[in-house]
Image (cartoon, coloured by chain):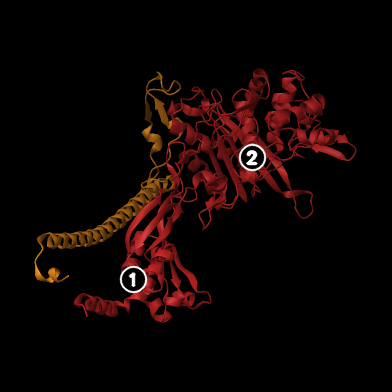
Amino acid sequence: MMSMFMGFDPRRAAKFAGLGLLILFLSWQHVQATRLGYQVESSRKRARQARSRVAGLRLTLDQTLSPSMLAARASSMGMVAAAPESLRVLSSGATDAHPSRPLLWARNVMSLVTPARS
Amino acid sequence: MDLGLRLTAAACLSLSPLAPLTARLAYLQIFKHDNLSVRAAGEFARTAQEATPRAELLDRKGRVLARSIPSWSCFVDKAMVKDPHAFAARLAPLLQIPAAEIERKTRAAQRFAWIKTHMGQAEFSALADARVEGLGLVPAQERVYPNGDLARSVLGLIGTEGRGLAGLELSQDSRLRGRARRLEVIRDGQGRTIYKNLTDAGDEPPALSLTIDRTTQYLAEEALKEGGEKRLFKEGLVAVQDPRNGEILAMAAWPPNPLRNSFVQDAFEPGSTFKVVTALAALESDLVRPDETFSGEAGKWQISPGVTITDHEPEADMTLAQILERSSNIGIAKVIERVGATRFYRLARAFGFGAKTGCPLPGESAGELKPLSDLTRVGLAASSYGYGLAISPLQMVGAYSAIANGGVLWEPKLLLDEKPPVKVRRVASQRAVQDIALMLEGVVEHGTATSARIPGYRVGGKTGTARKIDPLTRKYSSSAYTASFAGFLPASQPRWTILVVLHEPKGAYYGGLVAAPIFSRIGRRLLTLEGIAPDRPHDPALGTAQR
């Protein structure tokens, strides 16, 4: 036992140093894992916020393109719904995809003009 | 004494106080390991569930009718709130809620209380950054209907728990609702999340496409809304079906009510729109010749002692086509005497009256068709013009679709899936059905439904006006009516069958006066939108200016 305190054993010192390094490495790894965990969670939170923002924008888009909204805006711009008789056939031919549909229609512009609002 | 022995004794004496600690450590590590490790895990990790979004509901062209978006709810844990007044004052500007209301909720008897639900991202971020003690934040999914009340009687609604309460949200609930994600949340000593480990990815269901066409639905609702807002009727319904395959394109109701779908849940006495069944039964069995006439009895006919059938206009002799054009009760009652109860009943059943249609909406009514044994002479006569029986609007639109397509009854299709449309049966021969369809064109051309006409197009249909039963007296009311019109267009190649039903119209109450114009209005818009070429281009009503 006395020899333990009396001489320097390089092999033993190397073992202690290795052990110390291993503990340091494991500690560093643990700290890094925790730090990365926070970063991942923070990124997830940002992604969730972005998804939420996208969903909100999609909703706004859907609401803006809803028929009632479009009709109200068209009406405020003085537009009126076309009647079938205000369409004119320019070609009597039908396509293969739409046998019952003529190739081209044009609007009878005069019938769509709205009277001036009082 | 040997030095080694003395050192050993000294070491033993100095280490002996550690022996009980070692024993305790061994006990905890070996014998209590499982129990303690679970408790330790509970301190720093917990399992959480995250609701997956409910499936979208789309129209036939993929446009969104219902969608789920992320939202948040916040609650108060009163045990953690020391000063409710300060708590409320701090939250009020963040939540845009009066501080008094927050304080009232905080001071209520129960420990837990919702402060605000359906919060957006901005509110959530503001609250999360504020870190208010006693306030909890819970992620959720909010169901939104971007088109407002459009098709709400079809779509229905969901409850606060995210389960369907009515409409397709209810009937397709299991298909729309996903399985929640499960996460293991690792937290630090302060309760902040270090990491979330996904243990179950859950299940996000695919979107559900409907046969409803958003534009057609809007046109139908718009046509009803105008009269509804002016209180021209108490309740209005418009159904649009594709007669070629039974697909429902629109189901509009006024006033809109997401909790109730009157097309399938309600049944009504149809009145004269039902005369086509009687007329078809006669034609199918060759019981009436095209030129054969029936006496109109000058508008009054006593069918049995004490029972008189009347027409709104006194009529002379009429052919079957004229009976339909003038909507003569007396004429059609005489026709059914020749048809007989069995043939009439069999055809009514073939049209699907008195049976559920199979529509995937909850609470469908089968309607009511008197059993064959109960069809007396008077009862049969009443049934011939649509009294004494109850049908759902969906049954009626299906029946007119069968007439429009040449005699095939389709199951009403509301879900646009891979399943092909279901052909229920052929109700009558194509020849007889085509004859009836031509007669219905006559009704629109020069009968009771001239206001359903669309210049340049062939339109077929039939008006209906029925007295309603007064719930107090249980007799037919003299002031409450159901006005209806069922028709199809363009009659050369029908693309749409449209049913308009108005309950208790004010002022004018005849179907031809109040329901047919709505049909015409919707029909015109549909023809324009689809660019359907006129099937009667030389119609004088078109006028020279347009040609």
Q: Is the residue under label 2 in contact with that under label 1 (CB below 8 Å)?
A: no
In the image: residue A39, left or right of residue B25: left
Q: Where residue B365 sits: x, y (%)?
A: 68, 42
In the image: residue B165, left or right of residue B344: left
In the image, residue B33 sits, relative to residue B368, either above or below, namely below
Q: In this figure, which residue is indicated by the disc labeled 2?
A: B393
Residue B138 appears in which quarter of the rendering? bottom left
**Dot 1 amino acid type:** Arg
Foreground of the two, B428 or B189: B189
Of all chains in the rendering, the one displayed in red is B
Q: Quadrant of the C terminus of chain B?
A: top left
Residue B51 appears in which quarter of the rendering? bottom left
In the image, residue B104 sits, relative to residue A71, either above or below, namely below
Report the chain holding disc 2. Answer: B
Q: Label 2: few (<14), some or many (≥20) within 10 Å? A: many
| Residue B44 visible, this orientation | yes
Same chain shared by disc 1 and disc 2: yes
